[in-house]
Amino acid sequence: MKDDIKNQHHMNHVKDQHHDSVLVTLADKNYVNQVKQLFSSVYWNAGWSGDYLLLSHEIPEKDLLWFKKKGILVFKCKPLYKKRYYGSINGCDLSKLYLFKPYFKNWKHIIFLDADIIVKSSLDGLKKNKGISVVPDGMKIMDNFKKNPVSLGLDKKYDLNSTGFNSGVIVLDSRMIEEGVFSDLKNMIKPYEPYVLYGIQPLLVFYFYKRWDSLPLMYNVEVQKLQNHYYLKEEKIKGVVLHFDGPGKPWKKESGFYKEWQNNLELAEKIDLKNIPPAAKIFSDNEMMRYQKYLQGRKIVRDAIKVNISRSKYYVGRMIKSVSPRFYYYLGGQN
């Protein structure tokens, strides 16, 4: 009840702001610096002029003061599960479902970003999107499960071989926040939990099945996928949003993005929401399309030559491996 009253107080503050869009992220006490870096990159690189909001999953009040003093809104999330993990689902991740509470109808457009993201350029192009918009992840829906979901009868409702999406970036038209959406999603947690691999992502994929629109790839560039599967170096990786959704997080000193991440964190202290800087970069639709085609071309070439070369009867694989092991594995070679 106390949290509801506090959130209501922030709702009244929102009405005074007169902004029609909000940038949202989620964190617990272990990711406070990550959120500061994210908001900093949104402020300095995107020149975001809408509201900034933190979904707080049990972050101590003393740590929340920094955000409140900066004018960043705080929505305190009552844990949907008391322990840190509910089976394979992180309890904090469940709080992402609060995006679908009526509170967020105070804005026309909600842009949600995971905390393991660096924003590189303007996000204003997302304000025109209707419904719910996300970036396809290239995976079959079936790949989101650690157990075969057929026993849930999902194969009768959904094409499990169709493509899902990455829920690290969600662009939401608040008209999608209809009565009962939050409760419906919450009620999916218990029956789905024993099956899912990737947090609450499968819940969202199923709930919005065939109701989501695709965003250009550059709005959710999965950095490690480009590094590990396309062998792109840091300087070749472009995007409006760089998403580090694997183990190679940018706050680790061995990351090629560590200096940039650390610089953004330091600049967070200079955030002044009364004075919004211009965006550092604005990608045109043509630029986004060209880069997406470039990545698609690399994937086509790589897939075309991935011929289980390690099994070649002519020992081609062994020869390539002796010259360049990196290229050997890139071609699909096996140990």
Image (cartoon, rainbow, N blue to C red):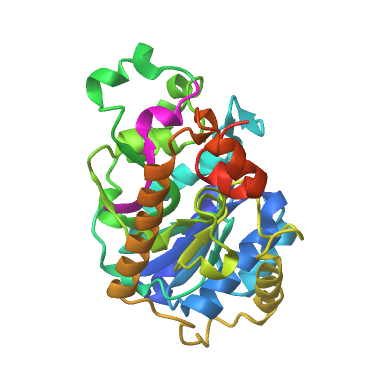
- Residue 104 lies, in percent from the top left, at 38, 56
- Quadrant of the snapshot with the C terminus: top right
> Of 19 and 135, which appears nearest the observer?
135
User: Could you tell me if residue 192 is visible in this image?
Assistant: yes
Residue 141 included in the magenta stretch of the image: yes
- In this image, 321 relative to 180: left or right? right
- Quadrant of the snapshot with the N terminus: top right
Q: How many marks?
A: 0
- Give the quadrant of residue 11: bottom left
- Residue 306 lies, in percent from the top left, at 44, 40
Q: Going 69% across and 66% down the picture, which residue do you hit? A: 65
Name the outermost residue toward the top: 151
Per the rendered image, the range of residues in magenta is: 132-146
User: Could you tell me if residue 184 is visible in this image?
Assistant: no
Q: Going 52% across and 85% down the picture, which residue do you hit? A: 274
- In this image, 307 relative to 248: left or right? left
Name the outermost residue toward the front: 314
> Of 91 and 221, which appears nearest the observer?
221
- Give the quadrant of residue 20: bottom left
- In this image, 248 relative to 43: left or right? right
- Residue 22 lies, in percent from the top left, at 42, 66
> Of 289 and 299, which appears nearest the observer?
299
Residue 251 included in the magenta stretch of the image: no
Q: Going 51% across and 32% down the picture, which residue do you hit? A: 314
> Of 185 and 280, which appears nearest the observer?
280
- In this image, 102 relative to 157: left or right? right
* Principal secondary structure, stretch drawn in magenta: strand
Image position of 171 with respect to 126: above or below: above
Q: Going 32% across and 38% down the picture, which residue do you hit? A: 163
- Residue 275 lies, in percent from the top left, at 52, 88
